[in-house]
Image (spheres, grey):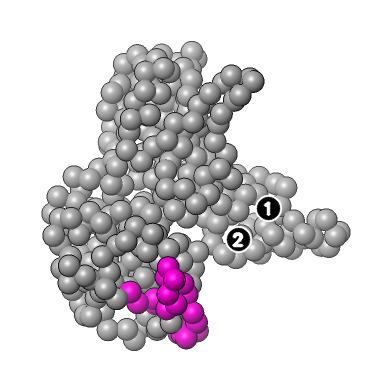
Amino acid sequence: MALNIAVLGATGAVGAEMLTILEERLFPADTVYALASRKSVGRDVSYGDKTLKIKDAETFDFSQVQLVLMSAGGELSKQMAPKIAAAGALVIDNSSAWRMDPDVPLVVPEVNPEALSERPSKNIIANPNCSTIQTVVALKPIHDAAGILRASVATYQSTSGGGKDAMDELWQQTRAIYVNDPIEPTAFDKQIAFNVLPKIDVFMEDGATKEEWKMTVETKKILDPKVKLFATCARVPVFVGHCVAAHLELDKELSAEDAKNLLREAPGLMLIDRTDEDDPAYITPVDSVGEFATFVSRVRNDPTVENGLAMWIVSDNLRKGAALNAVQIAEGCVNAGWLRG
């Protein structure tokens, strides 16, 4: 059952990771097309041990593929996804353009696979926000066991979440500080090197940023509309890997030890939590790079609220936070019989 598929946005960090993961997981693709804007046509990108030539997304004939993985930004997705879907291809989109559309499933396979019970009417499936994905993967087993009433989360998000230009700016500013060159922020409002910025995306009327709003509404759509979530999202001077400090108020009592047992057995999770001072174990962004799993450390009961629980959640945002989750959705669609070569 070999398929013809396309990756749109193949020159970006997430698009490149999609190609890598498709090959790593032996996705049943007979032909893979790498697509991007006209200015990138002819560039080489890697697909396993093969090299693909970038084709122009604007002129590509999408009727020749059954699946398109998109990571090209919200505005382009709004324009192109309906056209691609009308040509017959299933679209899995990594942007925020379709996430809150009631007719578009928003899917994390370990959390709400039932969202893929039938092929969506619009032929579009949305990939959630990077920090939302790792958060709901970790919250799912806790919610199933004890019911989460409220979650207060603080995120520490790497520059790769802002794309290649953001990563380059961290590198350039770090170098500039050491050689005493001037700092001129362009990708960010303020200096990112050796700094922390409590602003991701734009500010909204209530003082929250759009990133914080995304986490709130997406968690409700994916996990449970009854869960109350409040987020503060910060950008940190790290290249890859997002962290989330989650403080939960549960409906039922759950000990930290029982929570660890649940997390240890949950799909997509790896518990690394040892507080022995002679041999401590916890996860940092550097440890998560290149890994498929979402990691959880520092699971503790919080005595300041009734039935309180806290945890530290870390994931490679380019992998599980974007490309891997999209490929997992595609695998689910193949298993459901929606994609046929």
Look at the picture and state if 230 lies above or below 77. above
Is disc 1 surrounded by few (<14), some (14 to 19) or many (20+) residues within 10 Å? many
Measuring from the top left, give residue 230's x and y in whole percent.
44, 35
Q: Secondary structure at mark 1?
A: loop
- Determine whether label 1 and label 2 are within 8 Å by CB: yes
**Residue type beneath disc 2:** Ala
User: Looking at the rendering, in which quadrant would you find the N terminus?
Assistant: bottom left
Asked which quadrant contains residue 196, the reply is: top right
Q: Secondary structure at mark 2?
A: helix
Look at the picture and state if 75 lies above or below 141. below
Asked which quadrant contains residue 15, the reply is: bottom left
Is disc 2 surrounded by few (<14), some (14 to 19) or many (20+) residues within 10 Å? many
Measuring from the top left, give residue 43's x and y in whole percent.
50, 82
Measuring from the top left, give residue 192's x and y in whole percent.
68, 52
Q: Earlier in the sequence, mark 1 or mark 2?
A: 2
Q: Which residue is mark 2?
A: 166
Q: Is residue 197 visible?
A: no
Q: Which residue is mark 1?
A: 192
Q: Residue at x 81, y 56 (%)?
A: 177
Look at the picture and state if 212 lies above or below 32. above
